[in-house]
Amino acid sequence: MDNSTLDLLFPSVSGRQVVARFDGGDLTSDAGILLLRQADKKIGVVDAIGSCIEDNRQTSKVAHSVRDIVASRIFAIASGYEDANDLDRLRSDPALKFACDRLPSSADLASQPTVSRLENAVRPRHLLQMAVALAERVIAQLPPRTRRVILDVDATSDPCHGQQELEGFNGFYDTHCYLPLLLYVTGPDGIQRLLASMLRPGKAGWSMGLFGMLRRAIKLLRKRLPGVKIILRADAGFGYGELIDFCEAHKIDYVFGLRGNRRLATLSTPVQIWAALKYKWAGDGCREYGEFDYKAGSWPRCRRVIIKAEITQGELNPRYLVTNLRWKHEKVYLFYCERGDRENRIKELKLDLASGRTSCHRFWANQFRLLLHSGAYVLMQALQEAAAGTEWENAQVRTLRVRLLKIAGRVVESCRKVWFHLPTSCPVQQIWLHLNRRLSAGTT
């Protein structure tokens, strides 16, 4: 039975029967895709990714261009439809067609089998080109006179549920998974933008893919912003001598977490004692900072180490950082702590944009999916940036989607215009006006 003609019965109102049926025609429940398309016209995410894929299909047999397939997937993911199977229905949605530069009355978009074939046809060289192109579009959003940027790198788990290529059991996360590596860039506007995302095997070491990712990021940043000062932040999982040597060789500043050991405990004893005394006198909330020179066995020379000591739950809880920044030790530690907001950005990518939908068998197909989800996140971050100065400026991806994108619309196409008739009672009309104005610059 065709679900579109199935009557759904609901409790009556004022003696009248209430019946629903999916036969409304040219309606959309995702009119907010208009804003996403406007953001993409300004940033160029779809073109950046789609142009990197070689199309070796016979032209006479092609019904859907690579760009159309990429666009439909990115806009669908941003709208909350992370599964390619969703396109079997969404392919006829007038708003999604319009986002892909098609008129609502045009032929339907690609279905899931076509999308899946593309996912499995992409080659590693295409993926690298896509990653670089996406990074260029992100860096282009930084203010032109940016003098300092902060790079935050971190790994996260992507649980696997099958026999995907290169999945592995990771003891730290206690699951079979992939270990994506994520790189964020923060400019003077304070926005943590996703710059790069790399899928890695579940048993990948801390350095796998890291140095190549950083080299490309540094090259692109210095090309776009000559003379820019770059600071790399990372937790103790990356605080190794090889990464410190890398930073010094590429003339970038760094601040890394450092795992404690007996030598560090000995060198920091005076600071820890003073923190304990302050706790005895004043109780909780007393912190003590200090610094000293330290040389690990594999390091060629001493480096500056910052310590923060305080009593938590009745026990000393020292934290160590290694850095070449010449700021005061407390300022360095507080600067390092600012990277904590990056956890919210990772949650947005994983939970709100379902970047863990890496369920293809082939590893490279899953990397392609991660890039598509990353592209969708870049568009959503553009909406977040455009919302600055409103009550929505701190809203996360899920909130923006539910409140701004999930809006019903009736689509009417004439010979000269395409009308999207939105609800008169829509409570977010003013923010739509604000976003439309902010995103209109640079779009056509």
Image (cartoon, rainbow, N blue to C red):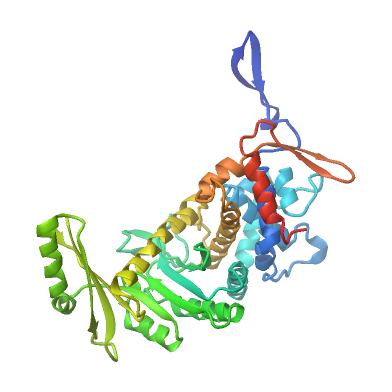
Residue 162, relative to residue 262: is it above or below? above
Quick one: 17 or 236, which is closer to the camera?
A: 236
Point out residue 114 in the picture as x, y percentages from the top left corner. Answer: 68, 56
Task: Name which residue lies at 43% across and 61% down.
Answer: 342
Q: Residue at x 54, y 83 (%)?
A: 227
* Quarter location, residue 307: bottom left
The residue drawn where x is 53% and y is 45% is: 391
Q: Judge whether residue 257 can be spotted in this image.
A: yes
260 vs 382, left or right, is left
Which image quarter holds the N terminus?
top right
- Is residue 3 depicted above or below 292 in this figure? above
Where is residue 295 shown, x and y percent of the image? 24, 86
Against 411, is 299 above or below? below
Q: Quadrant of the C terminus?
A: bottom right
In the rendered image, the residue lying farthest to the bottom is 300
Q: Position of residue 267 (x, y in %)?
A: 16, 79
Q: Quadrant of residue 245?
A: bottom left
Residue sticking out furthest to the top: 15
> Is any atom of residue 2 visible in this view?
no
> Where residue 237 appears, x then y in whole percent?
33, 71
Residue 22 as seen in the image, left or right of residue 359: right
